[in-house]
Image: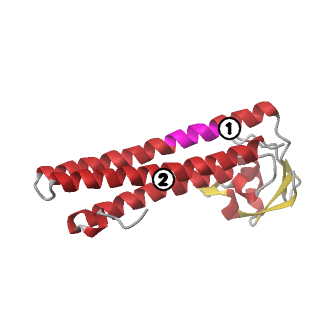
């Protein structure tokens, strides 16, 4: 996007920055979810969503253990505190993660089985649901921005023309962010469906 119309008007500058920040946060959150989706290959990011009860605090596995990928179909999880082995194994076995870890007393091996066609379709459905949830979040940011613009126009802080141009810019921001997310989702879907 070229120079921002809203950023040039002092009354709208803060609103523009806030909307941009909130939209970027939604896209970043979506990209974080993309990384954790399984593609059939072992990746440290697969375990980023796994939380372990670490002295009463849900903590990402990657913060309490060293996670490595010695081969394409295997993850190794070596906790820094050996007393966490059982907790990590329990977290990995949770149904929402679908892992079958093997604990040898020192480290945990997490085999990543090749994905079946059915499992690939399920992951793509999950991807599309996540995409739609984040599109909705972006639309909510647009709605909030438009509501604030209407209030500013009603309070005579901006003219109707300025309101209209600002709403068009907010819509353009939304379109750009949705396009970014859809492009990332397309790439991830191709990666998931690749055998």
**Range of magenta residues:** 126-133
Q: How many marks?
A: 2
| Magenta stretch prevailing secondary structure | helix
Q: Is residue 133 left or right of residue 150?
A: right
Q: Is residue 157 left or right of residue 94?
A: left
Q: CA distance from mark 1 to mark 2?
A: 20 Å
Displayed quadrant of residue 15: bottom left
Foreground residue, 60 or 154?
A: 154
x 69%, y 38%: residue: 123
Q: Quadrant of the C terminus?
A: top right
- Circle 1 residues within 10 Å: few <14, some 14–19, many ≥20: many
Image x and y of residue 86, in percent: 76, 51
- Circle 2 sits in a helix, a strand or a loop, which is it? helix
x 37%, y 67%: residue: 3
One can see residue 194 in this view: yes
Image x and y of residue 30, in percent: 56, 51
Q: Quadrant of the N terminus?
A: bottom left
| Residue occupied by mark 2 | 177
| Residue occupied by mark 1 | 124
């Amino acid at each position: 996007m070229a120079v921002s119309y809203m950023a040039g008007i002092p009354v709208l500058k803060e609103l523009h920055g806030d909307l941009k920040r909130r939209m970027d946060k939604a896209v970043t959150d979506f990209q974080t979810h993309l990384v954790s989706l399984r593609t059939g290959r072992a990746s440290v990011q697969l375990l980023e969503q796994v939380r372990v009860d670490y002295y009463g605090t849900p903590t990402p596995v990657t913060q309490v253990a060293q996670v490595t990928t010695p081969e394409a179909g295997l993850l190794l999880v070596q906790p820094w505190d050996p007393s966490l082995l059982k907790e990590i194994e329990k977290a990995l076995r949770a149904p929402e993660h679908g892992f079958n870890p093997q604990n040898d007393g020192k480290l945990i091996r997490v085999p990543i089985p090749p994905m079946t066609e059915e499992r690939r379709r399920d992951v793509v459905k999950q991807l599309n649901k996540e995409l739609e949830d984040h599109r909705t979040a972006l639309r909510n940011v647009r709605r909030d921005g438009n509501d604030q613009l209407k209030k500013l126009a009603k309070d005579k802080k901006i003219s109707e023309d300025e309101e209209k141009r600002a709403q068009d810019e907010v819509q353009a921001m939304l379109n750009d962010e949705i396009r970014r997310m859809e492009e990332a989702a397309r790439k991830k879907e191709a990666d998931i469906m690749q055998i």
